[in-house]
Image: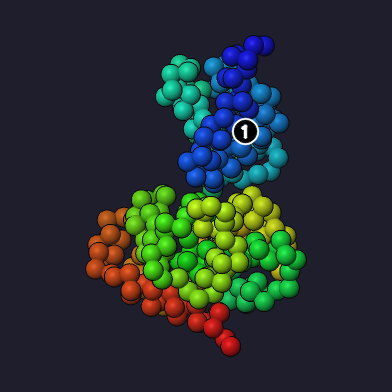
Amino acid sequence: MTAKNRSLNLSVYGSKRADELETLNRMVTATHYRRAIHRFVADMGDVRLDKLTSAHICQWAEKLKATGISNNTVDFYMRQIKALYNHAVLMEIIKDDRPFYKIRIKPEETVKRALNEDQLNQLINLALTDKEAKARDIWLLSFMLRGMAPVDIAKLTLKNIEGDSICYRRSKTKKRIVIKIPAEARRILHLYKGDGCRLIDYDYEKTNYYLKKIGAKLGIPFPLTMYSARHTYATAMQREDAPLSVISQSLGHTDTEVTRVYLAGIESTVVDKWNETIMSKYFNKH
């Protein structure tokens, strides 16, 4: 096979695209692509993008389901491969034969992934190895920064620091968010500061790997991952009787018109006040 022909192999094209995303600081998306590519090639072989068919996709979906993974995870893998395929079509490298046409994965209800108060306190105080402690601290950083999504943590640079706040646009909604940085969060940012312009030294895959080990130690009945910090923060706010509008503002949600109406008059300082209530409960005990 010539180098030109091999360039259309899913592993080659996908890796090149992931490299491009990393240069754009889209680290989490690049990692997602690599995960899906690795899984597809292991299950189905290194198929050329211009030879990808609906039969490949259907067979892969069945293989994934046969391993016992959830429909949501199957859908996650499918979306990554579909995105790579669509990129190749957009670049006019291949023609669109619509291999994903009529492929539907029925989503399942997401299992609750929030830690309760006891579990959160145990996590904060648990003695850990250095690598586990780093994963725990970055999880706590997400929690302290109003449940900041993993992709947004990965994108933070020095330019996002404005005075005593972090200012950024949420990747999913493009909503601008301003967060007053809690004292404990400053300690973590300093301890794990990144190279160059990156605000924090953060690897999504490694962090989740060690978080799952920590979750097993604590006996948490679901995989402890970076995204569970977001769920935990929202639940903690709810336990403190924070209004739904404040919780939505904290998380950067813009899901419904009703939510937008409620959020319209809420200043960032109001949300910071609720955030400080949560921080003082768990971190300012001395």
Q: Can residue 204 be seen by looking at this rendering?
A: yes
Q: Can residue 237 be seen by looking at this rendering?
A: no
Residue 218 occupies quadrant: bottom right
Residue 270 screen position, x and y as percent: 33, 75
Q: Residue furthest front?
A: 196
**Above or below 275: residue 99:** above
**Above or below 125: residue 200:** above
Residue at point 40% right, 54% down? 170
Residue 75 screen position, x and y as percent: 54, 39
Q: Mark 1 points at which residue?
A: 37
Residue 77 occupies quadrant: top right
Q: Residue furthest top?
A: 2
Q: Which amino acid does label 1 sit on?
A: Ile
Tell me the quadrant of the picture where the N terminus can be found.
top right
Residue at point 38% right, 78% down? 273
Q: What secondary structure is marked by label 1?
A: helix
Q: Nearer the viewer, residue 63 or 7?
A: 7
